[in-house]
Image (cartoon, grey):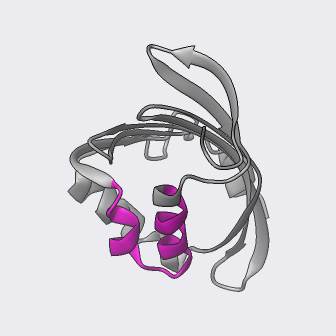
Amino acid sequence: MPRGGVRLASVKGNVLSLHESLPAWLAAALDALARGDIGGWMTIYADDAVHEFPFAPPDGVRLLQGREAIAAYMGGLPEMVRFGSLDGIRCREAGEETIIEAKGHHRRLPGGTPMTLDYVWFITRRDGRVVHFRDYMNPLQLASG
């Protein structure tokens, strides 16, 4: 059973666990992102990864295909957002499938105005690397303030 986890059910031979902390691989990548280290963040992705924003506004980015496209997009974030802490973390894992719910406390740049974002992430990995990241961030929260 994972650290701090509770066994919930068996899913396709994998145990589904629920816990209130991030998996180590994602925590390390988010720490890198908070430091503005996009290369450190990108270590989680496979070359053929897809990162989706299903709730993006009509004029927003909805789909990034391939590690290079994801890196190009993410490379602009440190100029717009200073990533801070996450709380209210609920993590569900079964094999290489991970679902995260969390609330992010960040600062909008320039100026440092506080910004809170609710996240729901559906992440699929293959051989330990992210191949599909569905990022259900609320665009209304991103646009407000």
Q: Quadrant of the N terminus?
A: top right
Q: Is residue 62 left or right of residue 3?
A: left
Q: Which of 114/37 is in front? A: 37
- Percent coordinates x, y for residue 82 in the rendering: 62, 77
Q: Which image quadrant for residue 42?
A: bottom left
Residue at 32% across, 47% down? 128
Q: Which image quadrant for residue 95?
A: top left
Q: Is residue 20 left or right of residue 135?
A: right
Q: Residue furthest front?
A: 1
Q: Quadrant of the C terminus?
A: bottom right
Vertically, is 32 above or below 87? below
Question: What segment is highlighted magenta in the picture?
Answer: 26-44
- Percent coordinates x, y for residue 14 in the rendering: 47, 23
Looking at the image, how many numbered discs can be counted on the residues?
0
Vertically, is 120 above or below 68? above
- Percent coordinates x, y for residue 125 in the rendering: 35, 39
Residue at 69% across, 56% down? 143
Vertically, is 139 above or below 33? above
- Percent coordinates x, y for residue 121 in the rendering: 57, 40
Residue 125 belongs to the span the image colors magenta: no
For the stretch drawn in magenta, the main secondary structure is helix
Q: Which of 140/18 is in front? A: 18
Vertically, is 122 above or below 117? above
Q: Which image quadrant for residue 34?
A: bottom right
Q: Which of 31/141 is in front? A: 31
Residue at 59% across, 26% down? 16
